[in-house]
Amino acid sequence: MLTMDDAVHIKQLRVEGLSVRAIVRHTGYARNTVRKVLRDEHAFQSHRLTRPSTVDPFKTYLQERYGQYQLSAVRLLTEIQPLGYTGSIGTLRWYLQTLKTPRQQHQQPTVRYETLPGKQGQVDWADCGRFALATGKLLHLFAFVMVLSYSRMLFVRFTASTKLAELLTCHQHAFAYFGEALGGL
């Protein structure tokens, strides 16, 4: 829930020269919410009904445990059920989201893996679906994709098979392509 203080903070960040995207990353609010605040179109709700939650009696315990170890909802559920928690894991997950900082909420789940030039390439097949030929027969089409890890240079070749012989042929064509593109390094 956006408060008046948050709106003032958003406007101050804009005055300091931050872009909408940077403000979103900094505050954790949605882009449209930030834009509405900056255009003075956001309606603040002054009276909000609050209902008791099944999590309420366990908030102190959850704050301590999550604050210390960032335990998952599944793990915390097994800990608080013997203490009398009768709610769902979804309710627990919703509450744990409120304990995360905006930076944790928008953190990327993957870590970029860097390599030195010429050390690694990654290969995969993509299923492109079935296409009708002029004869009416369906052709199953695949894409062989190779990406050089350092430069992110890409090679794609479409095939009708993913058998070993085709895989080896695709590798040969990819190496030839990269060799030509990189000047025979």
Image (cartoon, rainbow, N blue to C red):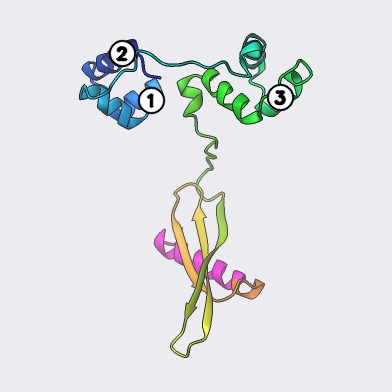
Mark 3 to mark 2: distance in Å?
Answer: 35 Å
Query: Horizontal placement of 24 versus 65: left or right?
Result: left
Residues at circles 1 and 2 in contact by the CB criterion of under 8 Å: no
Quadrant in the rendering for residue 17: top left
Q: Which of marks 3 and 1 is nearer the N terminus?
A: 1
Q: Is residue 2 magenta?
A: no
Q: In this view, does 95 lie above or below 143?
A: above
Range of magenta residues? 167-185
**Amino acid identity at mark 2:** His
> Which residue is rendered at x = 28% and y = 17% of the image?
13
Quadrant in the rendering for residue 8: top left
Quarter of the image containing the N terminus?
A: top left
> Which residue is rendered at x = 54% and y = 40% of the image?
113
Mark 1 to mark 2: distance in Å?
Answer: 12 Å
Residue bearing mark 2: 9
Residue bearing mark 3: 77
Q: What secondary structure characterizes most of the magenta part? A: helix
Residue bearing mark 1: 29
